[in-house]
Amino acid sequence: MTIEIKWTDEHPETGERRFLCAEKWGGEWRFKWKMQRRGEWTRGLNPTRAMWEYVLDSLKRRYRRREGVSDEDVNQVERILREWRAVPTDEEE
């Protein structure tokens, strides 16, 4: 079963509103984004810790309402956050 979580944030470089989507399919999480509501999704977004925290909060809220979220889904994201290591940017290398 596919889980899809959508929300908006600010693009870190431009400050414009950005549409985000975290999608779990086949046991793996994928993140994508777009700048316009009706635009095309751009895949391959490297999620930040804040994005993972948003996903975890959404899963916990959905789990209480039984919207297709299992203990395994919640545990998987909690494990990702426990093992979190920020991906270095070009400036940090």
Image: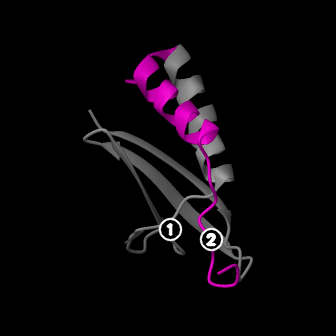
Closer to the observer: label 2 or label 1?
2
| 54 to 66, vertically: above or below | below
Corner quadrant of residue 17: bottom right
According to the picture, the residue beneath numbered tag 1 turns out to be: 37
Q: Is residue 69 left or right of residue 57?
A: left
User: Does the magenta segment cover residue 16?
Assistant: no
Q: Is residue 3 left or right of residue 9?
A: left
Q: Amino acid at mark 1?
A: Arg
In the rendering, at what x and y percent does residue 34 appear? Answer: 49, 71
Q: Nearer the viewer, residue 50 or 81?
A: 81
User: Does the magenta segment cover residue 89?
Assistant: yes
Q: Which residues are magenta?
A: 65-93
Corner quadrant of residue 93: bottom right
Give the quadrant of the N terminus.
Answer: top left
Helix or strand or loop: what does disc 1 sit on?
loop
Instruction: Count neighbours of disc 2 (C-alpha within 10 A) and say few if under 14, some if 14 to 19, many if 20 or more.
Output: few
Farthest-out residue, right:
15
Q: Nearer the viewer, residue 49 or 85?
A: 85
Q: Nearer the viewer, residue 82 or 59?
A: 82
Q: CA distance from mark 2 to mark 1?
A: 29 Å
According to the picture, the residue beneath numbered tag 2 turns out to be: 88
